[in-house]
Image: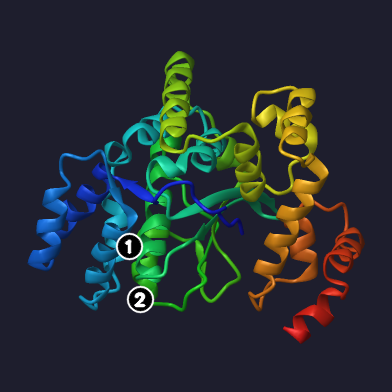
Amino acid sequence: MNKQQQPLCKASVTQSFTQAIVHQLAQLGVQLPPTLTEQLAAQQSQQRLPLALQDALWQALEQQRQPELGLQIGMALQPQHFDTIGFLLLSSPSLSTAVESLVNYSSLIGEGGTFSKAKSPSGWQISYEDHFKIAVALRIEAIFASIATGARWVAGKAITPLQVQFKHAQQLPTELYQQAFGDAEVRFEQAQNSITYSDDDWHFRQQEVNPLLQQQMLELAQQQLQQLQPRSLTERIEALLHRQPWLTRPQLAASLAVSERTLARHLAAANTSYNALSQQVKKHLALQQLQQPHVTQASLADFLGYSDEQAFAKAFRRWTGMTFSDYRRHQ
């Protein structure tokens, strides 16, 4: 349920990810418009492509009227297609560690949305909040099919999600979703896009993982992220709160590898504080998410990190001067 802050530079996507999609389309016999092919070819010397160009690619796929392409592309993607983050995920000792890297470094693949993770009653849930305007269903299904495939890489065994949720309506026959997600319960027209794994699969640890390699890949991913999105500490704090609004002050400082004193000093220099910035982000996310008909006061309270629904209700009234239900009715 996260939403991005305004980017400091034009959104982009890694070249290898786009080329992997183009290669898979050729394998499937799908022809792209000549103009688009020329535009992609002209960018081959670049490490990253403008996200707008990949938007054009997905728009061309949507015009093919083959809704199965999303799942087919997602299932065919391999670790090398994700550059550094692909090898980072493969070097992770467990799915839980891999998802932590996905949440923190997914923008290295593409800046089309943000991942988050949360404990659910049945296991652990990975959610994706997209910023797409074009071919949304195709792209989301490709992303989640690739997550299901990637989870099997990380675990080193055939694991199946418990549940997959999509915001969009069902696009394909049920048996095609079963090819991507096995026996998982697949739901459509839900409040969020998410995939849920059992506790056992989430914490299953491989024996062969090299911890030194994992550390090296983490350092490389961090370097690339800094190059991709050079930000001040204050901007990084805000971005992290947008992805994980439930973080407490100590958790936030630990995530950024700084002391709480350093955190407070940098925020004060920007004429703000943890409390002020946290409330600002939570208000923004709350008002944004209540536009979704399935979002409830209880679900927002849990996502935003409030101790109970009543605490969130008080904060919401302070932000808007209305109760949650009155505000939604007014809107």
Q: Residue furthest top?
A: 212
Residue 66 sits above or below residue 306 on the image: below
Kind of element beneath mark 1: helix
Q: Which mark is residue 172?
A: 2
Q: Amino acid at mark 2?
A: Leu
Q: Is 265 positioned to the left or the right of 293 in the image? A: right
Q: Quadrant of residue 142?
A: bottom left
Q: Residues within 10 Å of mark 1 (few under 14, many from 20)?
A: many
Q: Are marks 2 and 1 in contact (CB under 8 Å)?
A: yes
Q: Quadrant of residue 217?
A: top left
Residue picked out by circle 1: 71
- Specify how the rendered protein is coloured: rainbow
Residue toward you, 303 or 187: 303
Q: Position of residue 276 (x, y in %)?
A: 80, 47
Q: Label 2, label 1: how many angstroms apart (C-alpha)?
A: 10 Å
**Residue at position x 43%, y 18% from top?**
216
Q: Is 67 positioned to the left or the right of 118 in the image? A: left
Q: Which comes sooner in the sequence, label 2 or label 1?
A: 1
**Residue at position x 75%, y 71% from top?**
296
Q: Is 328 positioned to the left or the right of 146 in the image? A: right
Quadrant (top left/top right/bottom left/bottom right) for the C terminus: bottom right
Q: Which mark is residue 30?
A: none
Kind of element beneath mark 2: loop
Q: Position of residue 5 (x, y in %)?
A: 57, 53
Q: Position of residue 195 (x, y in %)?
A: 53, 56
Viewer can see residue 143: yes
Q: Amino acid at mark 1?
A: Leu
Residue 202 sits above or below residue 135 on the image: above
Viewer can see residue 27: no
Quadrant (top left/top right/bottom left/bottom right) for the N terminus: bottom right
**Residue at position x 64%, y 50% from top?**
242
Q: Is 149 positioned to the left or the right of 286 in the image? A: left
